[in-house]
Image (tube, rainbow, N blue to C red):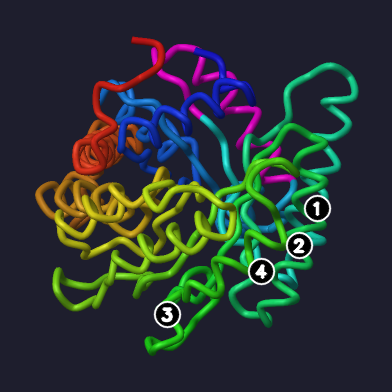
Amino acid sequence: MPIATPEVYAQMLDAAKEKSFAYPAINVSSSQTLNAALKGFADAGSDGIIQVSTGGAEYLSGPSIKDMVTGSVAFAAYAAEVAKNYPVNIALHTDHCPKDKLDGFVRPLLDISAERVARGEAPLFQSHMWDGSAVPMDENLQIAEELLAKCAAAHIILEIEVGVVGGEEDGVANEINDQLYTTPEDAIATIKALGAGERGRYMTALTFGNVHGVYKPGNVKLRPEILKLAQEAAASELGLGSDARPFDLVFHGGSGSTAQEISDAVDFGVVKMNVDTDTQYAFTRPVAGHMLANYDGVLKVDGEVGNKKLYDPRAWGKAAEAGMAERIVEACENLRSAGTSLSS
């Protein structure tokens, strides 16, 4: 199917919220990982979100180019073509963008989408993330307000982060401490600054102990009930019932989370969960297995010529893509999105 239109993307998020499931948002950095993500969503019968980070966008542009906008445009163009062959809806998203990279990443991409929309075309991406976790709350929301207006004009959904995710991703590192927990006051401030959708739709990554990186289950102290408290605070501010869920929530730093923690987060309004570390490993592990099992074929050992069928990048690439696709199916099952595609 074609890449999701803004209208279809909105329907996807509405369905997730109404039926209490969430979409895995899969980070990719190459055509191979993109194809693996598409296959994973199709195998699961789930619509989904595929995203690029600043580092992933740089990588996609070429190792000697390192231009985030070039890589993002190339990724979106390739995705738009190959996604047509899969029976699920896919939205394209740009991941964590800190303040110092806005002018080299999100703002130029918004300008490109604005030009496309003015010509009657769809935006290049369906959503963008502004990561203001490293700046004061007032500045975070001030920049979010500016970006929300531009996103709304280009038919794009904005994602923001309110709070701090610990660990490290693409060179942005935060300590693991009490700042990892968003307060109800933060939720109210967000509603006051950005509204509840009337100024443009946005998703909110509230933090409840989230940590980027690799952690065994139980090592990360998640408190999903914080999401419930934030929803209640926002609902009260808006004059809604206590069971309302005004925020479209995003779950960052989910590696190592237990099934119960993920389930609770979805129950409290999470509609998107970023998945990166686990799928990176799922892609790389079959490659390692192939190389170790076939070292005398992939290497020209003792003057031999090796085995072209074994060192052909397609040989180990197919295994890598299959491994990543399987992990995405698992993510869809954990987040309850398997079998929920709007196209089914």
Cβ atoms at labels 4 and 1 below 8 Å apart:
no
State the CA–CA distance, disc 4 to disc 3.
17 Å
Which residue in the structure is indicated by mark 2?
102
Q: Earlier in the sequence, mark 4 or mark 3?
A: 4
> Callout 1: helix, strand or loop?
helix
State the CA–CA distance, disc 1 to disc 2.
6 Å
Of residue 102 and residue 151, the one placed in the foreground of this image is 151
Query: Can see residue 328?
Result: yes
Query: Where on the picture, by quarter, is residue 65?
Result: bottom right
The residue stretch that appears in magenta: 70-90
State the CA–CA distance, disc 4 to disc 1.
12 Å
What residue is shown at x 59% (from left), y 28% (from top)?
Answer: 78
Query: Residue 315 at what x, y percent from top left?
Result: 26, 33
Q: Locate residue 279 relative to residue 173 in the image: left or right.
A: left
* View extreme (left): residue: 293
Between circles 4 and 3, the one closer to the viewer is 3
Cβ atoms at labels 1 and 2 below 8 Å apart:
yes
Q: Which of marks 1 and 2 is nearer the N terminus?
A: 2
Q: Which amino acid does label 2 sit on?
A: Leu
What residue is shown at x 73% (from left), y 71% (from top)?
Answer: 99
Q: What residue type is labelled 4?
A: Pro
Of residue 289 and residue 55, the one placed in the foreground of this image is 55
Cβ atoms at labels 3 and 2 below 8 Å apart:
no
